Image (tube, grey):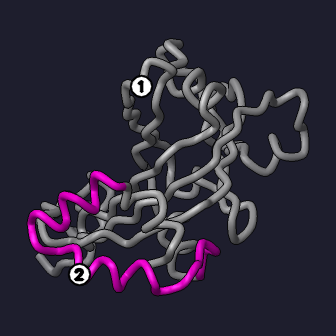
Amino acid sequence: MNQNFTKFAFTKSVKQAQAQYGSRKSYARMEESGDCYVLTEKEISFIESRDSFYMATVGENGWPYVQFRGGPKGFFKILDDTTLGIADFRGNRQYISVGNINSSKKASLFLIDYPAKRRLKIWTEAEVMETNEYPELSVKLSLPDYGEVIERLIVFKVQAYDWNCPQYITPRFTENEIKQWVDTQDL
């Protein structure tokens, strides 16, 4: 845990709810645990192994929006120990997340490893960048063998992160994970 996480997540109303339901004392100690938002090897390897994540943004009207982002493992790139990025591929062309990021410059990311029952929450300052204005970054974030059209780039500057409790994660497996398991069995 880190102070940035608690600073962003533990608002006045959250602290009031914690007090009401009996967890405030333990979380008050957490707030004093130190300030750390630099990704370690644990977070980096977890992020690089994901084939999807969820991204939450908020519009000017105050309404939250959550979008699923997916691709081949490794599509979510580590640019350095506090910066992440993706190539934003052509989708349904609603541009809700893009508009929200352009407005607020913030996004929360939620990454889940269903088989291992692990999840990572990341608070970020985000920026939408045009590929023609950032050709070197475009190359770093591209997936040459993927075959999808890159419309823009999204860069996430990590502000805080937290590993979340695995208690209620239902294990789910991709077709490829099942195939790999079956291939190792002596049937």
- Where is mark 1, residue-wise? 62
Instruction: Give residue 23's position: percent from left, percent from top.
Output: 17, 74
Which marked residue is nearer to the observer: mark 1 or mark 2?
2
Identity, as a three-letter code, of the amino acid under mark 2? Lys
Q: Is residue 170 left or right of residue 116?
A: left
Percent x, y for residue 134?
A: 88, 37
Is 168 placed left or right of 119 in the picture? left
The front one of 176 and 49 is 49
On residue 106, the disc is none
Where does the magenta region start and end?
12-40
Residue indicated by mark 2: 25
Label 1, label 2: how far apart the Cα atoms are:
30 Å
Q: Quadrant of residue 17?
A: bottom left
User: Quick check: is 22 in the magenta stretch?
Assistant: yes
- Residue furthest to the top in view is 93
What SS does tag 2 mark?
helix
Q: Is 174 or 114 nearer to us in this picture? A: 114
The residue that appears at 57% across and 57% down in the rendered structure is: 74
Q: Is residue 124 magenta?
A: no
Residue 182, given in percent of the width and then of the height, sits at 20, 68
Residue drawn 39% across and 37% down?
68
Whether residue 45 sits left or right of residue 14 in the image: it is right
